[in-house]
Amino acid sequence: MRALYSLLLWLVQPLLRRKLARRARAEPRYGQDVPQRFGDYSGLPPVAAGAPFVWIHAVSLGETRAAAILLTALRQRYPALRLLLTHGTATGWEQGLTLLRPGDVQAWQPWDTPAAVRAFLQRYRPGLGLLMETEVWPNLMAGCVQRGVPVCLVNARLSDQSLQQAQRLRWLAQPAYAALAAVWAQSDADGRRLRQIGAPVRAVTGNLKFDARPDPSQLQQALCWRQTLTRPVVLFASSREGEEDLLLDLLQGMDAALRERVQWLIVPRHPQRFATVAACVRARALSVSLRSSWAERPLPATVWVGDSLGEMALYFGLADVALLGGSFAPLGGQNLIEAAACSCPVVMGPHTFNFAEAARQAEQSGAALRVADLAAAVACSMALLQQPQTLAQTRQQALAWSQAHRGAAQRTLQELAPFLAPCLVATDANPNAVPQPGMAQIAP
């Protein structure tokens, strides 16, 4: 059955190449070194000799941020660690660039055909694979088993919807999950679902994203700007396609005096849509100001658009309340932990299956409020702004909830220790060893 799956993936390769070319028009990174996604590494210099790589696969932006938290703990304990970092998306790649040190390698995730997987493993010869959160591919797992590369699923999560899909494809999914050397789940519920599909869950270590610390310089900048504002700020955080139109339609139909009591801020989830969202605001005859046009302070407008990457702490710090993107359409929601760490309460819609446990906990602790739809979210946030004491209490509860769940990085590091030995030859020989000076190899 896996042979049929492999044949299908081989047949659809031209469609994937076409998709990458289409996406590259908005995000050029997708057009760079496309052959390497299919196992073609011709023209690249050979990989430098040394201890085997610890390979971390972080498919997109959220997983790469979680990987950064774990990687910081790993480097503190094992300073000579050699990193192989792979991604599937342009946003993951860009974030991953900030994690590289001399001697590290960055590469695209191989397309899940036997040939591409074999070429990837032959080139990089990792000593250990750490997949972040959800990325378990059948041929990748089979190739690692064949070469004796242990692969662990870290910060693992599996929603009810993903479990149902995996069970429909049990003949393909179960062998892949069973081939994992170990799994550490975010929550008891995630662990239970992962065991149902055959994954060897060793422990529940919590969610790494709770260990992230907001950028203090961004929070300080936000505090300075907040002192100059005359209106409270409602942030639509990590909004997805279609959701911005719903919000803008609500604002357009609102009484102007009521609408102007609030400063509206939209930060789209995907950077290729920044300009599109700004155009949607203008199309409704609403004034707009882009973050990229701000110098000393935000410029006045009905709607601000956060058209920058890596500044979510700034946006959450500016906001009095945040609407959770991805939760008002059946998209599963976005990460609400970062908002709580910035002491920003969240109003979320019904669709949070990608962060089900975190959303449930946040709601129970008072860090987040659940509503039926975006119209109710707007009404809820505006009502909350009229209740200063309730708002202040909710902000405190959000911060307390985020702080109470920290510690996943150290728990995961302790669990990983036995698996890291083959990759730490240099560290074992010299506990204080560090990578030699030089440029990090980057193999897109």
Image (cartoon, grey):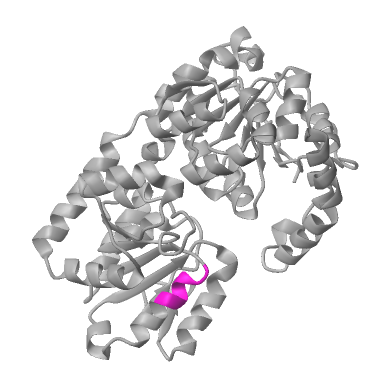
Outermost residue on the front side: it is 168
Quadrant the N terminus occupies: top right
Inspect the magenta stretch and tell me whether residue 244 lies in it: yes
Inspect the magenta stretch and tell me whether residue 339 lies in it: no
Q: Position of residue 153 (x, y in %)?
A: 56, 29
Outermost residue on the right side: it is 42
Picture layout, residue 52 above or below residue 368: above
Q: How many marks?
A: 0
Q: Which residues are magenta?
A: 241-246
Q: Quadrant of residue 146?
A: top right
Picture layout, residue 327 above or below residue 358: below
Q: Position of residue 174 (x, y in %)?
A: 63, 29
Q: Is residue 61 left or right of residue 328?
A: right
Q: Identify the residue shown where x is 46% and y is 77%.
A: 245
Nearest the camera: 95 or 269? 269
Q: Identify the residue shown where x is 90% and y is 42%.
A: 43
Residue 102 visible in the snapshot: no
Picture layout, residue 274 above or below residue 184: below
Q: Identify the residue shown where x is 41% and y is 24%.
A: 410
Residue 180 visible in the snapshot: yes
Q: Quadrant of residue 418?
A: top right
Nearest the camera: 319 or 384? 384
Q: Position of residue 235 (x, y in %)?
A: 34, 66
Nearest the camera: 329 or 292? 329
Q: Is residue 14 left or right of residue 419?
A: right
Q: Position of residue 365 (x, y in %)?
A: 21, 44
Outermost residue on the left side: it is 389
Q: Is residue 337 left or right of residue 444?
A: left
Q: Main secondary structure of the magenta part?
A: helix
